[in-house]
Image (cartoon, rainbow, N blue to C red):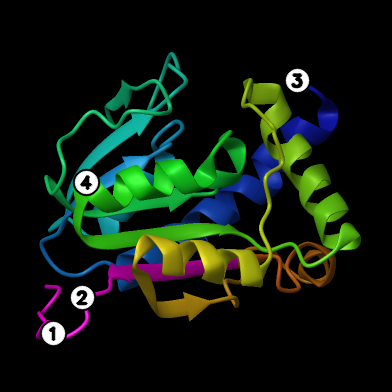
Amino acid sequence: MSLVTRAHGRFVFPRRVRRLAGHFARVLPPDASVLDVGAGDGLLDRLLLDLRPDLSLRAIDVLERPETHVPVERFDGVHLPCPDGSVDWAIFVDVLHHTDDPEALLRRAAGAARYGIVVKDHLAEGRVDDATLRLMDWVGNAGHGVRLPYHYWSRARWREVLARLGLEPTLWNERLGLYPFPARVVFERGLHFLARLEHRPPAGAPATATG
């Protein structure tokens, strides 16, 4: 593992994971059952459960790690190990851009989740954004054996995919505060978002509560 990767793990990752746990704790409804797709070592899940002990959480990942903060089940990265409608919410935390087909995995998660998906991911509106995100991904993940296909979408692409999947953004936050100043000037600047995506009811159907 490189010196840069070790420095990231010591100084950047702890703040980032604490901030994200706080965001997810505020966004998820009470007493929800949650499937974390791509949970890594489970640290975010552990912090989330500390903040929200009312949640029921199942964590899965393609990589099997020797030590995890919560039990993490292995899956093949394609087929979710749960039937449709079996959890309230699915969550993705910087996972979809590591997959070969982000839209397909989103579709499967939308099927598994009764109410919708909460996703934290990236936005790339041009070559500078793409290059910055590639650097960040390499520093944060290369030393852990994580695949890096660098699939970053623009806002327009996200809107297109979500419309196709029938998912409505009921919350969209691009001010996550993941990095301290001055790092946020380079590494935040609209490159990150967190969104709650709820199933759009069919045309003419009455609105229903999401818990």
Magenta highlight range: 193-211
Kindly report the distance in space between the C-alpha atoms of the residues bearing marks 3 and 2. 47 Å
| Residue occupying the point 71% across, 65% down | 191
Kindly report the distance in space between the C-alpha atoms of the residues bearing marks 2 and 1. 7 Å
Q: Which SS type dominates the magenta stretch?
A: loop
In this view, the mark in front (4 or 3): 4
Mark 4, Cα crowd under 10 Å, few <14 / some 14-19 / many 20+, is many
Kindly report the distance in space between the C-alpha atoms of the residues bearing marks 4 and 2. 16 Å
Mark 3, Cα crowd under 10 Å, few <14 / some 14-19 / many 20+, is few
Residue indicated by mark 3: 1
Counting from the top left corner in percent of width and height, residue 149 is at 70, 34
| Residue occupying the point 64% across, 71% down | 155
Q: Amino acid at mark 2?
A: Pro
Q: Which mark is residue 207?
A: 1
| Residue occupying the point 83% across, 34% down | 4
Residue indicated by mark 4: 112
Counting from the top left corner in percent of width and height, residue 158 is at 56, 65
When asked about the image quadrant of residue 76, the answer is: top left
Q: Which mark is residue 201?
A: 2
